[in-house]
Image (cartoon, coloured by chain):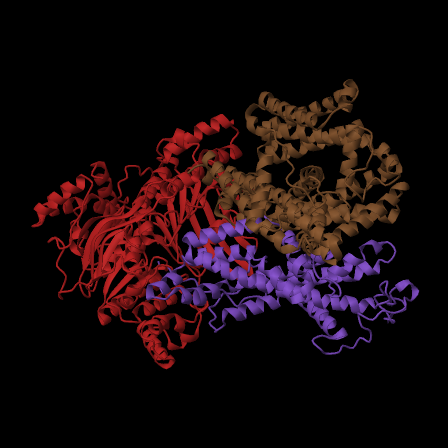
Amino acid sequence: MVKYILRRAGIALVIVLASTALSFFLVVVSGDPLEDLAQLRGPEKASKTALRTQVMHLDKPVIVRYGYWLAEVGRCLAKPFTGAECTLGSDRQGRAVLPQLTQAMGSTVRLVLAATIIAMFLGILVGLVTALRQYSVFDYATTFVAFLCYSMPSFWIATMLKQYAAIDFNNWLTNPTIGWGVLLAIALAGGVIWMLIVGGDRKLRWMVFGVATVATGLPLLLLVRLGWFSAPRLGLIGVILSAIVMAWLWSTLLGGSGKRAWPVRKVCAVAAGLGVAAYLVLNYVVGTFWDHANEGIILLLAAVAALAGVAAGHFLGGVQKSQAMKAGALTTVTTGVFIVLDRLLMAYPQLYSQTRGHPIATTGSQTPNLPDDFWFVSLDRIAHLVLPTAAIALISFAGYTRYTRATTLDVLNQDFIRTARSKGLLPRTVVVRHVFRNVMIPISTLIALDFAGVMAGAVVTETIFGWSGMGKLFSTSLTNVDPNPLMAYMLVTATLIVVMNLVADIAYAFLDPRIRIK
Amino acid sequence: MTTSIVTPGAAPEPEAPVHVTQVTESVSEAKLVFQRFIHHKAAMIALVVLLAILVFALTSIGAFGFHGWWPLSYATTGPVIDGGKPTLHFSLSPLSFSAGEHPFGQDDLGRDYFAIVMRGCQQSLLIAVTMGLTGTVVGVIIGSIAGYFRGWVEAVLMRLTDVVLTLPTLVVAAFIGRRIGSLGVVPLGLFLGLVSWTSLARMVRGQFLSLREKEFVEAARSVGAGPFRIIFRHILPNSVGIIIVNATLSIASAIILEAALSFLGFGVKPPDTSLGQVIGLYRQAMDTRPWLFWWPGLLIVAIALTVNFIGDGLRDAFDPQQDRG
Amino acid sequence: MADVTRDVTPGAAPRDGSDGATTGTTTAANREVILSVRDVGVDFRVNKQWVMASSAIDFDVRRGETLAIVGESGSGKSVTSMGLIGLMANNGRIHGSAKLLGQELIGTPERILRTVRGGKVGLIFQEPMTALNPVLTIGFQISEMLLSHLDITPAEAKERAIELMRMVEMPDPEKRYDAFPHQLSGGQRQRIVIAIAIACDPVLLIADEPTTALDVTVQAEILDLMRHLKDRLDSAIILITHDMGVVADLADEVVVMRDGLIVERAEIHELYHHPQTDYTRELLAAVPHLGSQIELRDLREAEAAAADSETGAEAASEAGAAAAGQVTLSAGQPAAAAPAEGPVDSLVVDNLVIEFPGRFSQPAFRAVDQVSFRIGRGEVFGLVGESGSGKTTIGRAVVGLQPSTSGGIVVGGTNIVGMKEKQLRPLRRRFAIVFQDPAASLNPRMTIGESIGEPILLHDKAKRAEIDRRVEDLLDAVNLPTAYRNRYPHELSGGQRQRVGIARALALQPELLVADEPTSALDVSIQAHVLELFQSLQARYGFACLFISHDLAVVEILASRIGVLHKGRLVEVGPREQVLAAPQDPYTRRLLAAAPVPDPDEQARRREDRRALLAAGVS
């Protein structure tokens, strides 16, 4: 296994190198760095031309120029060891490229990762469900929606989101009311969707419809009436509710049925309790500590939560120890997500006033001149991320859904699923234990391929939302025929894509014992 | 005591099942595929819509030297009437429809937007088809060579494909477009096709790998058929389905790619127009003059959607899944 | 007219087979009825119409008894049995009554059926290679079954799973518990599938073609296992199969199905000795029966005979060498009967070695190891072996599809090993190959005429009219209507396609025809016709034939000389009579002993012999 990883990593390195060579070629081909000087007249032209030629080595052959660039990169890679100055070259105006790159990378990497994770998660989930409910109305509807998303250019989606999800939504937020007609429509839609997902016989379907309609409509009504949208919070009640739902969800998926599930349910209940306790402690006991958290602390807390869940499963899981540990950890961590969400939302009123009533942002990757409050800044960043992420994720989502659906249908036709059914296992167990893991194996290859598309999507989306990210770096540099920033962009892009490929390869080997064990 | 064959039951009632008999009629596989495609409702509707768009785009303002029936041209400027608002009216009660002089409105130079959009439609379609077909041809060639010859040839070609895959298509297209964009629509399509062969190459290679182990290919080899005959007479004809489906889908993604490219400014350059370029030009006007954004956008989505559905219908026609109840 | 069941007369003579475990099987009629099926039918909805797959199915299965449901493909045997416990495709429906120990199965809600599946009814499927989930350990897959039906802890489940693995004779169960399916062989995987099926002590086992995908020797072991388990658990077995040999080995009662209906039902001896319907008679006649051409001897006698025969001395030394585990016979050794006439043999294989290079620092795999044999002009040579023996590799190498590492393949006087493609091409008209899978051996995009005519086009470069004429002649020769020339493969049945394959192979009138398991993928009745055709064609055209098969009975019908391959080595070669009646090599003996014979009495005797053979440690 280790040999496998090392070998893949070695190949990856070579591919990145070859990719930079190809990129350099493309950069050179794409335009003439001296073209804007063609308009000038007189002695200025000659001197400027000569200067630029010298700085950019335009008199040397392409290979040599590539060599110069590689040397720059080498210098940067060796920096930890030599401490030398490292700029990755300079752009046309003579400014160092590296600082521009690092600044642009931050926001773009956030965007790209968020979009990939959301698209993957939702896409796989929906794909699984539509395959299981093949030929149902839900299946057709989702297929159509997926096709639609697939057929819309990213700038179109982005612009529409900007208009309706941002501007119009912001306008609505100034006076959040909801008409009875709209409320009814949303509630019924919720009911229908859940009914189609759960399926089952007639009685069950109508029951689900009824419950889901009420469950969608009533809380929505309450929230609007109570003015929740002006100052959203989960609060203690919200966290308790989410903890209970998470506990129920994970214990149902992983626990089995009937009496047998009892130990797992017990563990999940305990885990939920731990989560609520953590909430209370963080917010009321160590309030200032929580106020000054940062990414690192949150990750640490997530690890602690997972450990606590595992411990609960281990000590209280009884006969179902391994399932209990998994379910417990999942419960604590997902409850933790809600706790973090709640704290973020506490910063909302501040955000609202700071952005003058435009919380969902349409421009830039963050609001400038914000006070140095982690939660505030994070919420602001998230608010700025929402739309661009949605724009990219919607397109990726379509791809994941279709692919997962096709793969799941394939797996469902396999012999071992018939064997599993012949054992008399619950359908739920067959899906979670037998179908899901086999579906994930080929999906990991899709992740790698899709990521390139996400990077491309980022270029367009950043332009529309006015982000100063890598997309803008690319656009501007290409328009101005500026090789060094362009090459920096290509280097980072190629590296990210190759890394994703590597991660996918490793996941594949990890998931598939036929590769792991000869 | 005797046992005997159970005779079939009495004459079947309406709901009783029928016995399956072997029907032997000579139906070639192409015909079967065609019949399955016709029965795919979504694909047929999409086909009709796409043809309608195509006919409209070509005939309204004319193409290839022919004059269309639309009086206005996309190039003549003029006075801007009523802020350039569209004059298209449609209402259900009373049922009335009038196109007016400028059904899609006017741009800020007073040019008729309908004509511009139709022209853009023609150009976008032309690029997309050129790009799709070129990419398919290149992909098939590369995939076939890699899949048939194996060995180091395959390794080199596949690594090359891997390298090209590390560069997002849009990015590579942007490089090319910047240089070629001004040369015209067809050259742009050609060159873009030259860099978008990767997925098709992989697919064709996969097909080759699986088909070359099949007995009928071995039978041909054992009789002494050479590589050419095997590739062109045995393997490729059996890959036609996959190739056509992927060619169609790549046309759909080509439309979207071209739109994005022109939107960013690296695609078709003025005075030539395309749907993406038009949207890019008027992107800021979304608030005040939404029609400048909506009409070309809707057309892009419509074309891409219909082509995608047709591709899906073709896929089902070539490779039908289990019959549903 | 209703079908009438032939009652088994009570007090019938006990069946021989002397397993020593015939607990209560004598008074079969008094045994408790485990499953009672009445008027069951299965329909499928195809193109908005309900199509019958089976109808009016009645049978009873008693405790301790094996009921075999025999039929060819399309007879409806599988879908009916699967349908009884609700394992049908979405577009199927089942009606009628099926009572398992008094509990009605058809129409019961799914959650009750789930308790029945696995808990009361165990299933064994056909394809062991794909029946297990590749990402879960085999031990877990057994435990899963236990945990979902019994109220026990995971630790207890693991213990019982290991016990089950021991019961199915899985070596080293504790270590194997954590193995993955891809690390096991086909036979081992099938044992695990059986372990899963019997895990909860079911009263009924439904085995759907459980040994079809397995080698003959493995098949014999699995059948033994199933018999022991049935006796031990005192359960009933429904055995679904098309293989009459397997039926003769295992079944007590037989039901014959055709096109969805039961055509005959009888106790096994009655069925074999007094079949009542034409279809059954045809079916029985069509099955290649080991010993049909030559007289097989009791295997223990055979050993003695071999020792006594005039080649005894040589045979003894051969046997000695065999005991040492290595037998190589050089071309022209006297024990192999000299070929008929003609100075130039059609095929001489001389010390052939074929190796496949290993991947990533794994050693090369030797598929064919120093194999030598000859085929005279017009002679049919049967090459027999199980999977992995290298027989297909040899077949392909002989027709130039597989490069050889060393050694010689001399076809009609010319050695083709190491030849470049250009040199080989003109020689290709001298040999031809018929493949196993009729579905894959014809190009779906070419008409039958084009497929058959391809060799003529490539070598004789004839004009269209002449090609058509010759194609029509060939179609005639294989008993296909000439009008099929313009049809496509998908319009033909399996048997018809195989005839086309044969016609194509004969297009250039080759000297040597290689037939790689040409009838293995066909139904039994079709198989017989194709073999008949083969015989008549061989007599008419006089080509030599390398007939590759895993089925000794088929080889017995066609071949005059037989070679036995085991793991790449030719362990025995000789005239048919000698190899089958007086085999020298212990592997050959094992192979012969394991091949089931479609006659229950004889099969029972053979089982005894085989047991003795294995017990004597001659393996």
Q: Is C465 in front, or is C427? A: C427
Residue C53 showing in the rendered view:
no
Choose top left, top right, bottom left or bottom right for residue A96.
top right
A397 relative to A157 in the view: left or right:
left
B85 vs C111, left or right, is right
Q: Position of residue A517 (x, y in %)?
A: 44, 36
Tally of marks: 0
Q: Which quadrant does the C terminus of chain A fall into?
A: top left
What is chain A's hue in the picture?
Answer: brown
The chain letter corresponding to red is C
Q: Is C551 rendered above or below residue C539?
A: above
Which residue is drawn at the image coordinates 59% and 27% (left, top)? A325
- Residue C217 pos. (x, y %): 29, 45
Determine the residue located farthest toward the bottom in the rendered image.
Answer: C465
Residue B118 image offset from top left, x and y in percent: 76, 68
On screen, C23 above or below C585?
A: above
Q: Is residue C604 above or below residue B239?
A: above
Question: Please, which residue is most extreme toward the right here?
Answer: B82
Judging depth in this view, the residue of C199 and A50 nearest the camera is: A50
Chain B drawn in what color? Answer: purple
**Residue extending furthest toward the front:** A43
Give the residue displayed 48% in from the left and 70% down from the top.
Answer: B23
Q: Position of residue C245 (x, y in %)?
A: 31, 52
Residue at 50% across, 59% down: B142
Please say whether residue C5 is visible from this viewpoint: yes
Q: Quadrant of residue B273?
A: bottom right
Q: Nearer the viewer, residue C575 or B87?
A: B87
